[in-house]
Image (spheres, rainbow, N blue to C red):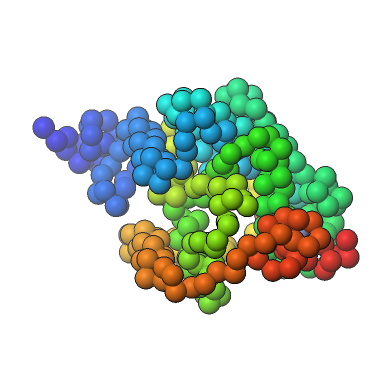
Amino acid sequence: MKPPAVSKGVPVCSCCGEPAVIYQPASKRHLCGRHLMSDVELRVASTIKNESQIHAGDRVAVALSGGKDSTALLVIFSRLLPSFQGSELVAITVDEGIAGYRADTLRAAEALTKKLGVNHHIVSFRDLISNDLDALLKGREKEACTVCGILRKKALADAARDAGATVIATGHNLDDEAQSVLMNTLRGDLPRLIRDTGPGSSSLFLPRIKPLAAITEKEIAAYLFVQGLFSVLPECPYTKYALRAEVRTMLSRLERLHPGTMLHLVYSKKQIEKYCEGMVVMEPLRRCLECGDPCSGEICQVCRLKHSLGK
Ligand code: SF4
Ligand code: ZN
């Protein structure tokens, strides 16, 4: 028999009747901590399976910032990966050099990998470009996320390759994906909105997967909270300059008023991808004339950035 929705004024789990910790508007279910955990892990497992994200023998590099998304990803992977025969996990943390922010998340990342017994590599912008992000941004703080994004992608890709990884997993969740759809739409950037299907992309880049793309930020926070793994960490001081922060606030409000908004945005992106298949011609990838990394023009974004920073 289906448990009642409410007991003594408290919502209860739609599966077992225990007190609920979360309501899922998409499935119209209340879930207790135990059923939330199994639901999240099952949905991540089915994303991996449906999209063939991981194969037996893969060495998966998890981009571990130490924040809640990547923490959840590593915890889930440490439970799921044994079912992919011979697969291995390695965690990579990029230290951008951001005062008042990165030290705490680095400590959290180190503690987690130690607890889970996962091999942990830390790479820094200082190693990559001989400077911390803070120093690079003097007078150009508004460009923080663009500069940070380009360098972080490079640092992560290099570290993953050095660690012998065959695939890179990031903790992007459903909220992040919906925000990206809206941001790329606001910028009028159709090629970035749709998937990169440029020829040669798979052989020149390590594949990147987003196993949490169907899980909301709220579900991830609750997933960690019920296991005692949730901790409040400082926010990056450059967040205030990011378009993403404004889009995030706007979308959270819309989601509250119109549940399903974020899911619909991600669905729209998939529809656009489908309709545009073969219509948008991506520039073929080649090698950067300066560093040899894959890129679509003559010089890659990192080398262009180095020039603009006078490096
Ligand atoms: Fe980098 Fe921007 Fe994220 Fe800060 S908010 S870590 S600057 S991308
Ligand atoms: Zn280059």
Residue 123 image offset from top left, x and y in percent: 75, 41
- In front: 145, or 193? 193
Total number of numbered discs in the rendering: 0
Q: Is residue 195 above or below residue 64?
A: below
- In front: 43, or 297? 297
In-image side of 248 versus 299 (left or right): left
- In front: 30, or 66? 66
Q: Is residue 241 visible?
A: no
Q: Is residue 52 visible?
A: yes
**Corner quadrant of residue 103:** top right
Q: Is residue 236 above or below residue 42?
A: below
Task: Specify the farthest residue to the left.
Answer: 1
In-image side of 274 versus 120 (left or right): left
Residue at figure coordinates x 16%, y 38% from the top left: 4
Residue at figure coordinates x 84%, y 66% from the top left: 307
Residue at figure coordinates x 55%, y 69% from the top left: 282
Q: Is residue 149 above or below residue 209?
A: below
Task: Specify the farthest residue to the bottom.
Answer: 188
